[in-house]
Image (tube, rainbow, N blue to C red):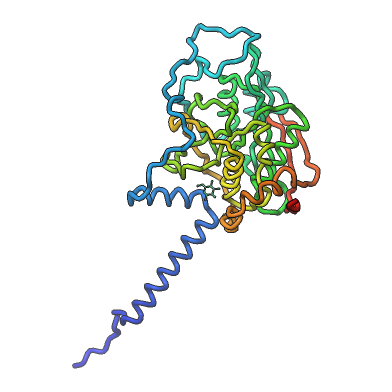
């Protein structure tokens, strides 16, 4: 008797089709994922590179290891005179800090700092003359869950470091894609309309410093504070990385004409700033790898999708420097609200024209 049955084994043509479909599906998924979740995609890439042992162990080019070895912190009993400049190395700056990523309600946090931090997010040490008057600029859009966690962590650290500060949250309104760089330009100008600052620190809302010896003041060179990140297994992205948490004096930022206004979406604006800073002959100074460690907040976070045009834009960083930045910035009047622990600057950003080359 002849058996009649179906052949369950695919013919070679069918197998190739299935293989091609699977490869197309996986490739599209990977491309879609890296487009919509760029930060996480980068972390996976670095992880893979480490596994395959093709990732060099980078050293940030501005890091001074001498700084790392200096242990000359104040002894516990030493007091500073009130007419003296606050030193950078207080006894309480004892290194590693514990990082608490638990959710906290802003009202509860306001109570915690009430009577200590002044309205608008202002604080100044009273036992010595602060070395820097720092404006902290936090670019922001829908990160209400992250902000109180950052403030709970950052404020006590700044107090220990005796830094005079004002915290500004620069909130992007409207429907345009997120423009971190332009927000920071707006924050810089608006902050200076309200107050004198000699140093600005651009601080991502989801970055929590892990070491309180990472001194949040400026230097005579633009500064990279965030060197290593937990999600990247504490490895450096690349030697010229200049994102996350960086700082420039008011003067330095003016000289480099601020950030470019052209970067809509995730990525590139920090690389562009690095090019500007370099063009003006600054060597970026950097926190050491031990001090420049940060934890990231990842929960409840919808990431901004990649700006694919950034690679092209980055080829003209130097040429755009003088026509695209603080001098070409235009924006609708910003709304300023004074909260207990920060000053909120809300602004609807629209693309601006670059100035004409003279
Ligand atoms: C982006 C930078 C970003 C870096 C992080 C680069 O591709 O252009 O903006 O900070 O990746 O890994």
Side of 174 where 113 appears, left or right: left
Q: In the current view of this chain or complex, which residue is farthest to the right? A: 333
Q: In the current view of this chain or complex, which residue is farthest to the front? A: 358
Percent coordinates x, y for residue 24 in the rendering: 44, 69
Q: Nearer the viewer, residue 57 or 15?
A: 57
Side of 53 where 224 appears, left or right: right
Q: Nearer the viewer, residue 271 or 183?
A: 271
Task: State whether residue 130 is above or below residue 300.
Answer: above
Give me the residue at 65% from left, 22% from top. 164
Q: In the current view of this chain or complex, which residue is farthest to the bottom? A: 1
Q: Quadrant of residue 65?
A: top left
Give me the residue at 72% from left, 25% from top. 119
Q: Nearer the viewer, residue 213 or 174?
A: 213
Task: State whether residue 303 is above or below residue 12.
Answer: above
Give me the residue at 73% from left, 53% from top. 351
Percent coordinates x, y for residue 200 in the rendering: 65, 32
Percent coordinates x, y for residue 175 in the rendering: 71, 54
Q: Quadrant of residue 86?
A: top right
The N terminus - image quarter: bottom left
Side of 57 where 61 appears, left or right: right
Percent coordinates x, y for residue 306 in the rendering: 57, 55
Give me the residue at 47% from left, 52% from top. 41
Side of 267 where 262 appears, left or right: right
Task: State whether residue 334 is above or below residue 45.
Answer: above
């Amino acid at each position: 008797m002849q058996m009649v049955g179906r052949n369950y084994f695919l013919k070679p043509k069918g197998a190739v089709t299935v293989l091609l479909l699977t490869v197309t599906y996986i490739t599209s998924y990977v491309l879609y994922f890296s487009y919509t979740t760029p930060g996480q995609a980068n972390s996976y890439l670095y992880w893979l590179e480490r596994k395959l042992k093709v990732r060099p162990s980078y050293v940030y080019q501005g890091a001074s290891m001498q700084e790392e070895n200096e242990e000359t912190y104040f002894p516990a009993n030493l007091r500073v005179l009130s007419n003296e400049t606050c030193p950078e190395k207080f006894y309480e700056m004892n290194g590693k800090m514990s990082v608490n990523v638990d959710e906290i309600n802003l009202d509860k946090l306001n109570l915690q700092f009430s009577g200590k931090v002044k309205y608008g997010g202002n604080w100044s040490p009273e036992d010595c003359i602060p070395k820097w008057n720092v404006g902290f600029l936090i670019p922001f859009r829908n990160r209400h869950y992250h902000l109180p966690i950052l403030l709970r962590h950052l404020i006590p650290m700044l107090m220990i470091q005796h830094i005079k500060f004002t915290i500004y949250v620069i909130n992007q309104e409207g429907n345009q894609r997120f423009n971190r760089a332009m927000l920071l330009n707006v924050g810089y100008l608006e902050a200076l309309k309200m107050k004198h600052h000699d140093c600005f620190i651009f601080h991502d809302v989801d970055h929590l410093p892990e070491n309180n010896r990472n001194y949040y003041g400026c230097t005579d060179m633009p500064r990279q504070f965030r060197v290593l990140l937990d999600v990247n297994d504490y490895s450096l992205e690349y030697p010229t990385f200049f994102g996350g948490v960086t700082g420039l004096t008011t003067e330095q930022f003016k000289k480099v004409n601020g950030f470019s206004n052209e970067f809509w979406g995730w990525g590139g604006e920090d690389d562009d700033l690095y090019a500007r800073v370099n063009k003006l002959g600054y060597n970026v100074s950097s926190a050491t790898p031990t001090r420049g460690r940060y934890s990231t907040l990842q929960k409840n976070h919808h990431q901004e999708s990649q700006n694919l045009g950034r690679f092209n834009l980055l080829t003209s960083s130097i040429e755009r420097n003088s026509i695209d930045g603080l001098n070409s910035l235009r924006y609708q009047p910003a709304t300023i609200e004074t909260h207990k622990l920060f000053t909120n600057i809300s602004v609807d950003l629209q693309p601006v024209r670059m100035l004409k080359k003279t």
